[in-house]
Image (cartoon, rainbow, N blue to C red):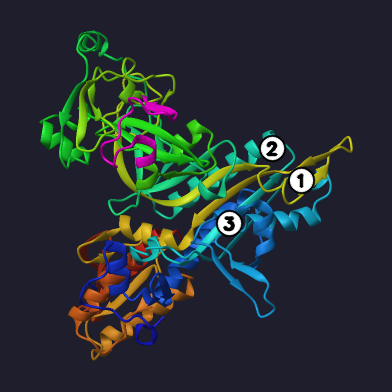
Amino acid sequence: MYQSSLLAPTMRDVPSDAEAASHRLMLRAGFVRPLASGIYNYLPLGWRVLRKISAVVREELDRAGAQEMLMPVLQPAELWRATGRYDVYGPELVRFKDRHDRDFVLGPTHEEVITALIADEVRSYRQLPKTLYQIQTKVRDERRPRFGLLRSREFMMMDAYSFDADDEGLDRTYRAIYGAYEQIFARCGLDVLAVEADAGAIGGEGDSHEFMAPADIGEDTIAWCASCGYAANLEKAEIGMRESGAGGERADAARVPAELVHTPGARTVEQLSAALGVRTDDILKTLVMIADGEAVAIVIRGDHEANEIKIRQALHAKTLEMADAGTVAAVASAPVGFIGPIGLDIPIYVDRAAAEMASGVAGANAADRHLRGVVPGRDFALSRVADLRNAAEGDPCPRCADGKLGIRRGIEIGHVFKLGTKYSLPLNAAFADANGAMASIVMGCYGIGVSRMLSAIAEQHYDERGLRWPAEVAPFRVHIVPVSWKDAAQMALAEEIYRTLTAEGIETLLDDREERLGVKLKDADLFGIPHRIVVGKRAAEGVVEYAERSWPQPEEIAVGEAASRCRGIAGR
């Protein structure tokens, strides 16, 4: 392509509202332009990269035995009501009525649609297994779109769904798609971690893994062990058992009764720590939550954060939320910030780390009062102890004896999980087995954020000058830059190289614009095309400057050698 024909409006200044490097650079390089908050136009360069990513996804999924199809964005609300998700999915689900007053949604995902289709079309075990996928626009009304394409309201996603006769079949399909994901991300130049994860709003049974691209800007937190390779999303991360050294200290503390202390205004852990001169890990923090409509107390250490997913699972609760101030006052006769476990007439669940404390400071269930020297097990029962908190840096690994957990940020770009019969049961997706008995189809679900991958790759491949696309997904493989558009010899050689490479199927961009060399090179750096040939004053001798974007130290070589390098790097 000739660059004079390309719509690629570059920007010299960094947009003030762009927080992520990928967002800044793709705006500056003319890959995307915003239409509204969280909604983007993909300009030709950005769309070319998306097409390359999509092609890799298709090739690997097809190789794994999946079949591509396409489903509607518009979905009847009754399908979502049948699975119970219409009312519980949350405000991200875009709901509306058509002109006939029928309820519809804009699809954030397609479990209901695909399951209804299979329920109508599959009747026998002979028609199983099946794995179907699509690459399509999704819509979610994000409360706070941010970081460009990393969290947007309209985005491209690959979503796949597998249908098997039994759990063993699902295991085989799960492993096949998991392996396809590994190939997809490797080909696209992404460094990823496969981490154990919660299935989230889509739900499911059994295995669930997220594929995370480590990046400082990532909104997800990963707990991982360098010793054994264990990795999990913070929502799911388990914490290994450590030997408690509190036995002797607890025996000593048990001889002294808890002491009531005056703590005016000390509502937070930090305020209480400052007021009493104690460390935050010497504080017992009590939270009142509503689980399936009933109040419960959760006790964790002051320096730890409660994990709502773990708490919900420990309580076998369908719904969980923090109690409001009125409920807290009714339960404990004290304002928020002064609640403690002693004397509460509601179920008390204690995190393991809090249960292991020798003693600590806890709320006294009275305004501006706390108790110092509270001993777990003596002053309040330890009949309900579980892992109820987020993992923290340095926690023991749950998989190996000596490992310690580290904490890092990541971008979720893919998810694979087993659905079991969560959708096939309510939507009557059943089949007749070899004996003629009816059974529910066993399902799996698999997603890749295709447009999010565009940003994730950019986050891992850039420098101070611009983007540095891996060859597999770069918008072009070769960028030819003549020094002077006025020099006939330079333009003739540039055209010759362009025609030769293009004829061989190597995607090439020729900068034929009437611009200064400095402008051309700055734009070339922003674009991040892997291989650059600069045609300059030695064009008449057949000598050019060749450089790779990942190692941009140019060298003067014969034009034939430059073309050969482009062929080799382009995989030819």
In this rendering, the answer to whether 273 lies above or below 402 is below
- Disc 1 packing (10 Å; few <14; some 14–19; many ≥20): some
**Residue 510 horizontal side relative to residue 80, left or right:** left
Q: Tell me whether circle 1 and circle 2 mark residues in contact (CB < 8 Å).
A: yes
The label nearer to you, 3 versus 2, is: 3
Is residue 336 highlighted in magenta?
A: yes
**Left or right of residue 136: residue 81:** right
Q: Nearer the viewer, residue 39 or 281?
A: 281
- Front-most of 395 and 403? 395
Give the CA separation, mark 3 to mark 1.
32 Å
Instruction: Give the residue displayed 27% in from the left and 71% down from the top.
Output: 526
Q: Quadrant of the N terminus?
A: bottom left
Q: Which residues are magenta?
A: 329-351
Which is nearer the N-term, disc 3 or disc 2?
Answer: 3
Q: Residue at x 38, y 40 (%)?
A: 330
Residue 124 image position (x, y, % from top left): 84, 46
Q: CA distance from mark 3 to mark 2?
A: 32 Å
Residue bearing the label numbered 2: 169
Q: Does residue 108 belong to the magenta stretch?
A: no
Mark found first going from the N terminus, 3 or 1 = 3
Q: CA distance from mark 1 to mark 2?
A: 9 Å
Q: Nearer the viewer, mark 3 or mark 1?
A: 3
Direction right: furthest residue: 436
For marks 1 and 2, the one nearer the N-term is 1
Along the horizontal axis of the image, is 8 left or right of 76? left
Look at label 2 and name its amino acid.
Answer: Gly
Circle on res. 87: 3
